[in-house]
Image (spheres, helix red, strand yellow):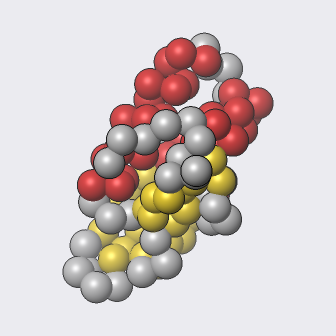
Amino acid sequence: MELSGSTIITVNKDYVYCNVEDEMVLLGMEDGIYYGLNPVGAFVWEQIKEPKTIDQVRDAILDEYDVEKEECERDLFELLQEMTEKGLVEVKVND
């Protein structure tokens, strides 16, 4: 699926998660697979517990971290694409 700034994204409710220090561990209830998120990935996960556009998540990252907008967008899209492929997040194209 092609992601854009207006794409709405949220966590997949089939995953349970917990914070471990400043990172996050996810467990798929269907497949029993564990995933780990670094501090920035954990921040993104916290942001998308409620549906948000990718632009809203990007803006929250820019407010929280010292990163250039272009680098932030590139890394965020890469992370969300990977999370989408693994079924960790649900995606809805905003019409």
In the rendered image, the residue lying farthest to the bottom is 30
Q: Residue at x 58, y 51 (%)?
A: 94
Outermost residue toward the right?
Answer: 63
Residue lying at the far front of the rendered structure:
95
Q: Is residue 34 left or right of residue 90?
A: left
In this view, 46 is above or below 59: below
Residue drawn 54% across and 25% down?
72
Residue at 43% from the left image edge and 76% from the top image edge: 15
Vertical placement of residue 45 versus 6, above or below: below
In this figure, what is the number of numbered marks?
0
Q: Residue at x 43, y 41 (%)?
A: 3
Asked whether residue 44 appears in the rendered view, the answer is no
Residue 19: x %, y % from top left: 56, 64
Above or below, comparing residue 65 to residue 79 in the picture: above
Q: Position of residue 87 (x, y in %)?
A: 32, 65
Camera sees residue 58: yes
In the picture, residue 40 is in which quadrant? top right
Indicate the position of residue 91 as horizontal and vertical percent values: 46, 58
- On screen, residue 27 versus residue 49, left or right, reads left
Q: Position of residue 7 (x, y in %)?
A: 53, 47
Camera-side residue of 63 and 1? 1
